[in-house]
Amino acid sequence: MATEFDLFEIMRTTRSMRRLKTDPVPGALLSRILEAGTCAASGGNMQSWRFLVIRDGTIKEAAGAWYRKAWHEVVAPRYRSSEPAPQMTPEGFNRMLAAAEHLADHIHEAPVWIVPCLAGPRQPGSGASIFPAVQNMLLATRALGLGATLTTLYLIHEKEAEAAMGIPDSHHSYAILPLGYPLGKFGPVRRAPLADVVYDDKWGKCWTEV
């Protein structure tokens, strides 16, 4: 396991962990992860976020039904009719699909969900006040040897899923982070090289360090 303070190694090995053990996660570890989330920036430092921690199996089953519906009826057919992402082999793409389908069918079995929410209506730019907190929590989760993934596809059935989770009309959720001890192993993420995604002063001019 990477040390808690080796930030760059943690970032390089924070994979989406969609296959999780059902073992309970100690509350002390969850508190550290949630505190990491609250260390993030938010617009005007308003900190209007709220983090709903769901461990109740009945609630997870009810909301997870809407997640499965979104996956099997909308998202999975869309993925299966598309090509693999750049830098991904067909085999890797199929493994990703299998892991995503496993999550859809077993998301209610993850011992913990963290659901990041914001007060007020969802509007352009509002994610800037919640997703930094989400990333902090994902990195903290990895640092503590736990696995998680960020998923938003349940928002296809947003009202129904939020009602199942008991989220009031005054707030909206932005993701679900199913969290637990991973069944798989951490390892380096596979990403496109900087030369393919970074431009230097002028659009289309590849980045160079010089």
Image (cartoon, rainbow, N blue to C red):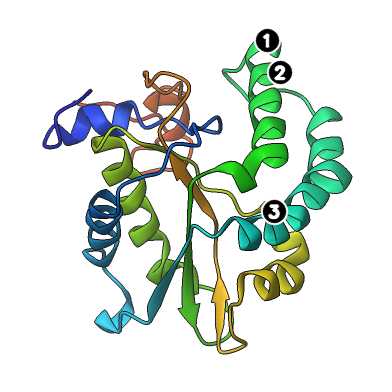
Residue furthest out toward the left = 5
Distance (Cα) linking label 1 and label 3 = 28 Å
Dot 1 crowding, Cα within 10 Å, few <14, some 14–19, many 20+: few
Quick check: 107 left or right of 74?
A: left
Q: How far from the left and from the top, in percent, is residue 10? A: 25, 32
Q: Are discs 2 and 1 less than 8 Å apart at CB? A: yes
Amino acid type of the residue that numbered disc 1 sits on in the rendered structure: Glu
Distance (Cα) linking label 2 and label 1 = 5 Å
Report the residue at 82% width, 51% height from top. Answer: 69
Residue 153 got which mark? Answer: none
Residue at the spot of label 1: 91
Residue 94 got which mark? Answer: 2
Which of the two marks, 3 or 2, is nearer to us in this view?
A: 3
With respect to residue 34, does 96 lie above or below?
above
Q: Are discs 1 and 3 less than 8 Å apart at CB? A: no
Amino acid type of the residue that numbered disc 3 sits on in the rendered structure: Gly
With respect to residue 114, does 126 lie above or below?
below
Report the residue at 22% width, 27% height from top. Answer: 9
Distance (Cα) linking label 3 and label 2 = 23 Å
Quick check: 137 left or right of 16?
A: left
| Residue 42 occupies quadrant | bottom left
Report the residue at 39% width, 71% height from top. Answer: 129
- What secondary structure is marked by label 1? helix
With respect to residue 166, does 205 lie above or below?
above
Q: How far from the left and from the top, in percent, is residue 73? A: 88, 46
Q: How far from the left and from the top, in percent, is residue 176? A: 54, 56
Amino acid type of the residue that numbered disc 2 sits on in the rendered structure: Asn
Residue at the spot of label 3: 64
Quick check: 9 left or right of 6?
A: right
